[in-house]
Image: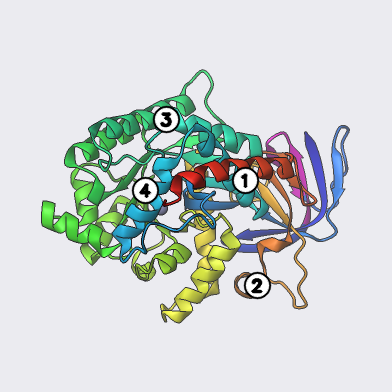
Amino acid sequence: MAYLLKEATLVTLDPVSIERSDLRITADRIVERGPGLEPRQGEEVLDLGGRLILPGMVCAHTHLYSALARGMPPPPRSPSNFKEILELVWWRLDRALDEESIYWSAIAGAMDAARAGTTCLFDHHASPSHISGSLQIVREAIERVGLRAVLCYEVTDRGGTQEREKGLDENLSFLRSTTETQSPSKLFRGMVGAHASFTLSNESLDYCAELMQVFGAGLHIHVAEDRWDVVDARSRYRLGVVERLEKHGALNRNTILAHGIHLADEDIDIARSAGVWFAHNPRSNMNNQVGYAPIGKFGARVVLGTDGIGADMFEEARVAFFKGRDAIAGLDADDWLRVLANNHRLASEAFGADLGGLGAGSIADLVVLDYRSPTLLTTDNLGWHLAFGMTSASVESVMVDGRFVIRDKQFSVDDQDLYEQARAVTEKLWAKLRVT
Ligand SMILES: [Zn+2]
C-alpha cells in the first residue's frame, strides 16, 4: 500500500521535534517528508487536519501470557511476599496455560497494545505445560493482530531439568526461525529468555550464554526485582546478581535487565560497562510492593516496560513520572520522553532499522493521535503534556510496517469476535485456577 498523510503534526521524542508536515509512505517505509507533497498515482490520500503522528510506542518488557489474568480467581491464600506472589499467582497461571490459552492470551494482549498505540512488544513468555512451539503460537497471534515483537522463552530450573532443556530449545528454535537466511522475519526477532538468577543453576546460565553467543542475541531476564534474588546470589554463589551473569558470559549490549530494584552499586557498574538496557516497570513494582528502582544510577540506557500490566506506554510513562516525583528522585517530565525514545532505540537496534524517527527511510510504525489540548504544544513542553494530558484515549490510528492495524479507531481484525473467543478460553483457563 501507499499513503500520503497530509497536514500531520509530526512529533519525535529525543531530541523533541514538532513540525507540521506531510508524509509519504510506500510499502513499509516513510519515503518522503515535507510540506505540500503532491499525491502520486496509486496513493491513498488522508488529510489528518493537524492530528499528531508519533513513532509507534515500544514496550520493553511484558508478559502476554498474563493478558487473561485480569480479574482471575484469587490464589489459595494471600501471598505474603514476592516469592509467594510468584508461587501462588503467576506460576500457577503459567502452568495452567495450554496451546489454546497461550494463543488467546497473546491475541488479547496484542489487541490491548495496539489500542494503546504500542506497535512493538518485547515479550517474556512462560508456559511450562506447553513449552515446545509456544513462541510460534505467540508469534501467530501477534501476526494476526499485526504488531511487531521480540520474543523469548523464560528458561528456568524451577520445573526441573527436562523443562529447562525444553525452554532452551524453544529459544534456539525461535532464534533460528527468525534469522534463517532463506526467509528472515521482518516483524519478529528473538532473544534468550531467562527467569531470574535465583531460579537458574550455573549450568543453565552457561547454556543461555552459549545461545547468546551463537545468535548474537541479548538475554532478557529479571534481576533484583525482589531482595530475595540478591540474597540468593550472595549466599549460594558469593556473587552479586549481575556479577554472576557476567561471570557466565551472559551480558551484552542487547541484554534487557528487568527491574534492577535491589542491585548493589557494583552490580550496576558491571551492567553499565556491558552496555545493557535497564527496563523499569513502575506499575508492576508498586503493585508487588518490591520497592523503587535506582533509576538515577542506571545511566543513559533506561527503557520502560509494563511487566504484563497491559502495554500502554502513555500510562506507564505517566506513572513513572508521578512515582519519581513521589520518591523525590530528581527526575522531571523530559526524562520520561528520553526513556520512551530509548524504547525506540532498543527496537531499532533489535530490528536494524529506524523505528523512532519520522523521516525518509524510517520504518512506518506510527500512531495517529487526536490530541486536543487547550494549551499550546511545543518542543519545550511536550514532556509536561505527556505527564498531565496526553493519553492513549486519543489514539485514533495505528500503523505497523506501513499497514494500518487500527484506522479511525477500527481494528483491521474483527476485534469483537476475537474478544468473545478470548473470553470463552478464559473461562476454561480460570476453571483450572479455581480452588475447590
Ligand atoms: Zn517480568
At horizontal 88% and vertical 33% (from top left) the residue drawn is: 41
Q: Is residue 73 magenta?
A: no
Q: Nearer the viewer, mark 2 or mark 1?
A: 1
Task: Name the magenta segment's main secondary structure.
Answer: strand
At horizontal 25% and vertical 64% (from top left) the residue drawn is: 227
Instruction: Locate the N terminus and report the quarter of the image it occupies.
Output: top right
The local secondary structure at tag 4 comes to: helix
Tell me if mark 3 has few (under 14), some (14-19) or many (20+) residues whose alpha carbon lies within 10 angstroms of its own.
Answer: many
Q: Does the magenta stretch include residue 24?
A: yes
What kind of residue is marked 2? His
Residue 385: mark = 2
Tell me if mark 4 has few (under 14), some (14-19) or many (20+) residues whose alpha carbon lies within 10 angstroms of its own.
Answer: some
Disc 4 and disc 1: Cα gap in Å?
A: 21 Å
The local secondary structure at tag 1 comes to: helix
What kind of residue is marked 4? Trp
Where is residue 166? Give x, y as percent: 33, 30
Position of 436 with respect to 148 (left or right) is: left
Residue picked out by circle 4: 91
Where is residue 180? Give x, y as percent: 47, 22
The local secondary structure at tag 2 comes to: helix
Mark nearer the N terminus (4 vs 3): 4
At horizontal 68% and vertical 36% (from top left) the residue drawn is: 28
Q: Nearer the viewer, residue 34 or 200?
A: 200
Mark nearer the N terminus (4 vs 2): 4
Mark 4 and mark 2 in contact? Answer it, CB < 8 Å. no
Residue picked out by circle 1: 423
Mark nearer the N terminus (2 vs 3): 3
Which residues make up the magenta segment?
21-33
Task: Reply above or below: 108 against 280.
Answer: above
Tell me if mark 2 has few (under 14), some (14-19) or many (20+) residues whose alpha carbon lies within 10 angstroms of its own.
Answer: some
Disc 4 and disc 2: Cα gap in Å?
A: 39 Å
